[in-house]
Structure formats: structure tokens, C-alpha cells
Amino acid sequence: MSGHSKFANIKHKKEKNDAAKGKIFTVIGREIAVAVKEGGPDPANNSKLRDVIAKAKANNMPNDTIDRGIKKAAGDANSVNYETITYEGYGPSGVAIIVDTLTDNKNRTAANVRNAFTKGGGNVGTTGCVSYMFDKKGQIIIDKEECEMDGDELMMLALDAGAEDFSEEEDSFEVLTDPDSFSAVREALEQAGVPMAEADVTMIPQTWVELTDEEDIKKINRILDLLDEDDDVQATYHNWDE
């Protein structure tokens, strides 16, 4: 993955999120609700909830907000039921885009996602049309400045915990895991006091598309911005080499 500094993207996204923290808190709040419904409110017995709590803390979500979200999801039998729906499609010049959503209104979400693609000159395709171009992996990014361990020590810790791959970028370390091993590896790093800039199960492109036409770049940014603004959208993955 050389040449693709995921960490630079995270810093860029975090800066954007600082101006729109409500969006990221909405996203995480929904993930908390789903995790509690699936596995109960006790993080000790619910690894998915532990992962979401770690993600919440990495995004500076206050502890009382996290606790309120867990209590609300656990205590309210009539709380909203969110459904996971994934959309796949193409942006300009065949850029592959995957959109994960959590929604309580499928029609609204489908219309909004289609609208985002259309306004950026793209189109929504059928299920599976682009996902074969990505690998589903647990991905943990560690900021070198924040981490006291050296690369070799960190690599051994990650591999011993079950990680598949470890790589070093200029400003960060990247740990990749099988999705099923993600929680165990993340927790091993957490227990060792390793600070994580980002830790999530994600879709990693196998190949990248470079855009040189200014109009195409404007269009792909239009699609991604519209999806980013939609509260139903949990995550967007693409293979545009930014």
C-alpha cells in the first residue's frame, strides 16, 4: 500500500469531522445501538460493542454520551431498528465505490445514495459489481509520534495477537487482520497501551484509479461529500488514488 498514506487521509477526515462532529457521533451512536441489540449492553461479553466503544473514544466521544447510548439501546424496547444496507456503484472514470448504511427508512436512504451518485456523474450498480475489487480487512493505524514502541516490537505484538500483516509508513504503522481476528488484535494492542488513530473493519482496494481530469476530480468529490453529509451513511470506500 505504499504511496497511499491512510494516515494522511485520517488526519484530513478528522479535521473535517471536527467541524461536523455531530455526523460522526450520529454514525457511532447507531453502531452502539446495533451492537447492543445484537450482543447485549455489557462490553465484557460483547466484543462488537467493545470495538465500537474504542472507536467512539478515538473520535473523542464523551464517556457519558457513550453510556447514554448504551443505556438507551438496552432499555428501550421500542428504540429504532436499524437495517444494514450496502450499495455499490461507479464514480467518474470507473472509480469503484462501496457505501455502507444503517437506516430506519430504506426508501429514503436508497433515494439519497442514488442522488449522490447521479449528481457526481456516477451510477449505483448491482450488489457485487465492485466489491470483488476490495478485500475486507481489520485495519489499525498507529501514529508514530504517539507510539512509544519501536516498529519491530509493535510488529511482534501484532503478529503474536493474530495480525496478518504489518507495514510501516513515513508517519504511521498499519496493522491488517482477518475480520474475525480484528477484535482480539485491537484488544491486545489496547492492553499494551498502544494508541490507535483508527481501528475498524474496512474495505481495502486491490487496485487504484488515478484521476487526472479536473472535472472528474470535482465529480468524485461531489459524490463523496454528499455521502459524507448523509446521516444514514456509516462508511464509504473507494479506489480513487487521491
Image (cartoon, rainbow, N blue to C red):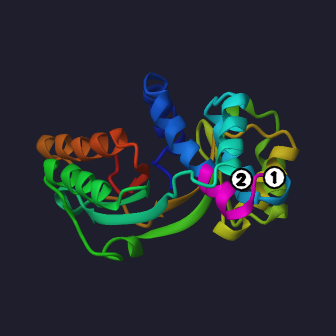
**Which residue type carries mark 1?**
Asp
- Judge by depth and name the residue closer to the eye, 124 or 178: 124
- Judge by depth and name the residue closer to the eye, 86 or 216: 86
Start and end of the magenta stretch?
33-43
Quarter in which the C terminus is drawn: top left
Q: Do the residues under discs 2 and 1 have CB atoms within 8 angstroms?
A: yes
Q: Position of residue 93 (x, y in %)?
A: 18, 59
Whether residue 37 appears in magenta in the rendering, the answer is: yes
Q: Which mark is residue 42?
A: 1
Res 133 quadrant in image = bottom left
Q: Position of residue 89 (x, y in %)?
A: 27, 65
Against 10, residue 239 (above or below) is below
Given this view, does label 2 or label 1 mark the residue nearer the observer? 1
Q: Position of residue 18 (x, y in %)?
A: 49, 24
Tell me which label, 2 or 1, sits earlier in the chain.
1
Against 26, residue 162 (above or below) is below
Q: Which mark is residue 49?
A: 2
In this picture, residue 128 sits left or right of residue 170? left
- Residue at screen point 81% across, 52% down: 42
Whether residue 41 appears in magenta in the rendering, the answer is: yes
Q: What kind of element bears circle 1?
A: loop
Q: How many other residues sit within 10 Å of disc 1, few (<14), some (14-19) or many (≥20)?
A: few
Magenta segment, principal secondary structure?
helix
* Residue 196 at least partly seen: yes
- Residue at screen point 83% across, 59% down: 45
Q: How many other residues sit within 10 Å of disc 2, few (<14), some (14-19) or many (≥20)?
A: many
**Which residue type carries mark 2?**
Leu
